[in-house]
Image (cartoon, rainbow, N blue to C red):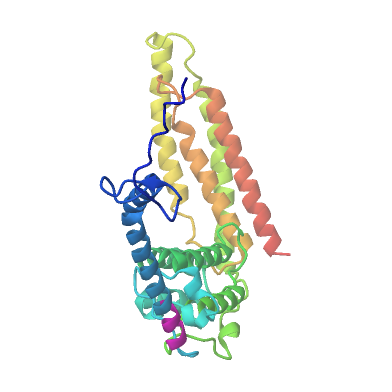
Amino acid sequence: MGSDQTPPRRIGILCEIHNLHFNPQETWGCALCRREAGTVQKKGGNRIIAALVGFVVLVAGATYLWQRRSVSPVETPQIAPGGTLDEEQTAGVSPQRLALDPSAYRPTIDRIESVLYQEKPPDYADISGIVRAGRELAEEIRKRESHLISSAACLQIITWSASVDQSDVGYAAPNLADARSSWESLRSNTFRNATWFRSAGPDTALAQSPRPARVDPEIVQQMEECIRGIRSLGEAGQPESDAIGEILGEVDDPESREIRRKWLSWAQSWGGRIRAVSAKLPKHPGTDADVNVVMAYQSMNRALSDLRNVTVPANDYGVPFLYERNNRFQAASQCLADAASYLQKIQK
């Protein structure tokens, strides 16, 4: 029945790669050959780009290795302002080779070293000056150098400035020995050597030693007299103030107006008496005076300030309340007691 049908005859030749037939009159290869050729054509551009990138990386690597070998062991790499050094460039390089050129920062460094190596005892203005100069130096480095270099240097300098700051040590004499030692260590780690760097002489530490506290007997005697005069003024003024009274009712009633009139008259007189006592104050004992003399002088001035403020009202009546005045009289009395106590300490 179906014996008359014959299988279709294959036309073409056999692909030697994929063992598939194709008609050479219609196409140049089998189906698999044509598909693979299309894939290669699409990927050709990517292969070219990859080859170029590989070539660039190879050239960069060769250049880097050549530069590493060309640096002398004693040569200092130049760090241009605003330049960068990566971690590989700094690997194995001594700190001195990576240190900063100090000439760009000489004015600020000179300000620091003029105090650290001065031949006299420092005062608190000196300490404040080098703390401020240290912070300015860190800011200058941050703006001028690369981040990799400036971040470490700025941290060291800011830490040093904080350690030098003695604003919270009370009346202790400033000491530059530790600050000078830590500065020299920081300087050698941060900057390249310079001939203009200063160094301590054999007598620097001795010259910077604090002088013995000075006590001027004349000033002490004047202060004792002023304390007595201020105390007598306060003891006389409080009952006078109490006798005037205070405004508690209507502001414009006759009694309130009379209290205000009496108060304004007394306040004017009180101000003149305060000025008379203030004129008798001795001059400031000086920063090199005995600390007890300085503390007594400050307490005495606080007492005068409290008495001066007795007439300052905290209301709209123009007359301070009695409790305000009495608080200020009491505060002045306590300050005078403190001043006398300080003076007693230096007489023992």
Q: Indicate the position of residue 124 as horizontal and vertical percent values.
A: 51, 65
Vertical relation: 167 (above or below) 242: below
* Along the viewing direction, whichever of 295 and 318 lies nearer the viewer: 295
Residue located farthest toward the left when viewing the structure as drawn: 25
Counting from the top left corner in percent of width and height, residue 5 is at: 42, 27
Residue at screen point 57% across, 60% down: 294
Residue 337 vs residue 301: left or right? right
Front-lying residue, 14 or 116: 14
Do we see residue 145 in this rendering? no
Instruction: Specify the segment rendered in magenta.
Output: 64-71
Q: Residue at x 46, y 69 (%)?
A: 86
- Picture quadrant where residue 201 is located: bottom right
- Quarter of the image for the C terminus: give it: bottom right
- In magenta stretch: residue 70: yes
At 58% from the left edge and 31% from the top edge, which residue is drawn?
Answer: 327
Residue 105 located within the stretch drawn in magenta? no
Write down the quadrant of residue 178 in the picture: bottom right
Residue 180 coordinates in the image, percent (x, y): 56, 77
Give how far across and how far down residue 89 sits, in percent: 47, 74
Looking at the picture, tell me which residue is in the foreground, 145 or 122: 145
Q: Establish if 254 lies above or below 139.
A: above
Residue 233 visible in the current orientation: yes
Classified by dominant secondary structure, the portion drawn in magenta counts as helix
